[in-house]
Image (cartoon, rainbow, N blue to C red):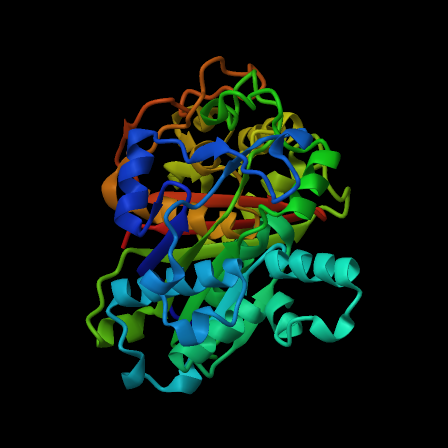
Amino acid sequence: MAPKVVVTGLGIVSPIGIGVQEFWAAALKGQSGISSLPSFGDLAAESYRSRVAGQVQGFNVQEHLDEKFASRVDRYAQFGLLAAKEAITDAGLELDRESPDRVGVLVGAGMGGMMMGEREITQLYNNGKPQRVHPNFIPTITLNSASGIIAMAYGAKGPNLTISTACSSSIHAIGQGLQCLRSGKADVIIAVGADASITPLVFAGFCSLRALSSAYNDTPTRASRPFDKGRDGFVMGEGAGAVILETLRHAKRRRARIYAELAGYASTSEAYHMVIPKEDGAEIAKTIRLALEDAKLPPSQVDYINAHATSTMVGDEVEIRGLRRVFRSRVNRVLVNATKSLIGHTLGAAGAIGAITTILTLNTGLVHPTLNYEDPDPECALPGISATVQEGRIKVGITNAFGFGSNNGVLVFKTF
């Protein structure tokens, strides 16, 4: 029989706060982390179709991280390092007392070291001097730079993997951590999601894709509006989330505080379209059902859903169709919210931040508001979505994440 897996530590870097307490207090207040896009050097913000973003404020590398590690990685990995540091501290995990081979690191990242990548390629073409490319360029831009530096910082010698499946990356990092612990390959997994891609090229690329909101450039806090009739695209965000996963036996042995049980996980591919989900919601529904089957729970026991809900016209509708397929009439009694309404879409970090939100919801019984839910789209409207804080007896929650490339992931958490 596979061991139970529990969550013992949380860490977060977000546009509404660094640290779980700051993040959660802001989330319950319905505080927006969306602000005007700054200019990228000579590239004025006004040259971009979308000019709003969810940016991490007040992040000082020297204040938060050991310079020995922080100076060797890109901004996204710095976020990941800090989130991991906070989660380890929160878990009371003394890694020098653990067997290094039994501690693993799994990171989900969508884009990787884009800040350094864009800077170096621009300088190369501007100055025409290949010999002046930064010596750490390659190890810094690789997607596994975050997992590598986190493992080095904490001496974790167990499984070390990076998963990149766009917006669902960190859902899969956490889910693969669950499977790793169930299979006996580790006792502890540091699971992290991180992205920092508010960069000139990446932002321009999403603008060209017509995926970003542009109707609220003059009122940034109104731009991210999942399930609302006035939504017109997602808002780019940045940040990181980290969770400490342990086998129940290991957590009990060290008398750790347990936030929740990670009870189920499912991963599927729609094999349909690189950007648009299948319109009937059937594939999303299938993924949710598989995750609940893995958790050995019926849909009737789900009390709360942290929706993927990016604030795109098609995506939000399809997700709700998927929920209606799974929960049928009971969907009207499930509490639902969209964390991206507060912080934007943090790409590879979104699943981890959604998971942390789900865990905090289970622990407090409080569901943070879905910001800008002012004129509900009839195709998306559910009684459980609210622009104000909701309270309930919440024992089971699920976290959804659906990525470009037809990639779906769902996690199921239970109160412990």
Q: How many marks?
A: 0
Q: Residue at x 54, y 38 (%)?
A: 38
User: Which of these two is toward me, 390 or 370?
Assistant: 370
Indicate the position of residue 262 as horizontal and vertical percent values.
Answer: 39, 57
Left or right side of 351 for 137: right
Q: Nearer the viewer, residue 392 or 197?
A: 197
Residue found farthest to the left: 255
- Quadrant in the rendering for residue 200: top right
Residue 257's image quarter? Answer: bottom left
Please state, as top left, top right, bottom left or bottom right, where the C terminus lies in the image: bottom left
- Where does the image place residue 204, in percent across and percent down from the top left? 70, 40
Q: Position of residue 141 (x, y in %)?
A: 63, 66
**Residue 43 in view in this figure:** yes
Q: Position of residue 273 (x, y in %)?
A: 77, 42
Image quarter of residue 253: bottom left
- What residue sits 45% from the left and 15% below the top? 374
Q: Is residue 387 above or below residue 41?
A: above
Instruction: Tell me if residue 252 comes above or below residue 214 in the rendering.
Output: below
Identified at 51% across, 56% down, the residue is 194
| Quarter of the figure with the N terminus | bottom left
Q: Is residue 357 left or right of residue 113?
A: left
